[in-house]
Image: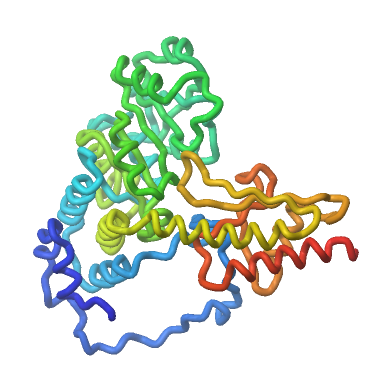
Amino acid sequence: MKTNRRQFLSTLGAAAPVAGLVHPSAALADDETPLAVSNDFSDLGVKSFINAIGPYSSLGGAVMWPEVIDAMDYATRNKIRMSDLQDAVGRRIAALLGANAAMVTSGATGAIILGTAACMTGGNRERQERIPDTTGMPNEVLILKSQRYLYDRSIRAPGAVLVEVETEADIRAAVNERTAMMFYLQNRPSNLALTVEVYIRLAKEFSVPIFCDAATTVPPVSNIRRTVEMGFDLVCYSGGKGLRGPYSAGLLLGREDLVRHARANGAPNHRAYGRSMKVAPEEYLGMMVAVEKSLQFDEAADFERQLELIEQMDASLSSLEGVITEIRTPGVEAREPYVEVRWDSSRYPIAVADVKQALRDGKPSVEVRALFLSDGQLHLTATMLKPGEAEIVTRRVREILLGSGDA
């Protein structure tokens, strides 16, 4: 049954002040008929696909919780002062996740940009007006050399300069009056010359704010509280992946002063550098409900569901002569099991990239993990699979491998 507006508001609990700010006359009449629109992607000349990769941004993220959709629908029908909504939702999310403060951002990337701006400007309005011109303000961000990645350009966006370090000695030599922040990538802790505990300790020793990108480390949702408690000053998360919130939303958690400065650098502030990184009212409310729902969800049962499907795919593919499979579960990344598939190239003369393309081009189309994320191997996950799709995915892989020798 669809949750009506009265039922939905009664579930907000501690967020009741948010509902209290809404003028009821702003809502559409319950019997108002919406405009008829197409809900078929094929009408636009694009095709849907079977998702055997997971909730990646390039593929539309995760399927939102139904409760999130109801919350977003409510917010689109009622208007509210954005600053009031920011305050109320931020307090509620912070309390739920054990953080000092929280804000909803335009995705994890937006959180990195605003968090970096917060550390550089420190609440100084004149500095906030000038970025990305960082003349005369701390603008250096220490980053571990092995953790350079695609999205570190988000750190540089508001005018920061990256300083690569590898060891404790490097950090001690690099920290100076221009150091604004230290940065850590939570999903890449291996092959480091120092532990995360030492990295955090050094940040505290030098009184330098330390930012952690933990965007893709949920589920389990308990990872959020655990990461916050490690001592990072700021931590960001993607809202449209493991938390199953709005696709373009994210979270920034951490020190109250730094979160406040981050807000000052973002929308709806008219002159802010991050003015373009708007978060819609429905995303604020939807993100809050996504956190609430994720904390209530039986993640252990869902993990077992995924694992059962992975074992089925593993059995189907490993039955082929010359095919080797292995079931794995990521360590620091989101706890989503997958099966890695390898094969004897003399028996099946086809490259992994060609298998991936054949899956994409087939009917139905199947998407699998990008090869640069899977070390060049074929990875299949069950996180996003609907009933019956695991069998389709393995059948397509078998067909492609068995047909590779016919060319």
> What coloring was used for the rendering?
rainbow
User: Front-most of 317 and 85?
Assistant: 317
User: Front-most of 396 and 108?
Assistant: 396
Which quadrant is the C terminus positioned in? bottom right
Going by the picture, which residue comes out furthest to the right? 407
The picture quadrant where one finds residue 309 is: bottom right
- Please tell me whether residue 233 is drawn above or below residue 393 in the rendered image: above
Residue 280 at least partly seen: no
The picture quadrant where one finds residue 264 is: top left
* Residue drawn 39% across the image and 26% down it: 182
Which quadrant is the N terminus positioned in? bottom left
Residue 227 at least partly seen: yes
* Residue drawn 44% across the image and 15% down it: 171
Q: State the count of labels.
A: 0
Is residue 305 found left or right of 22 in the rendered image? right
Picture coordinates of residue 2, whole percent (x, y): 28, 79
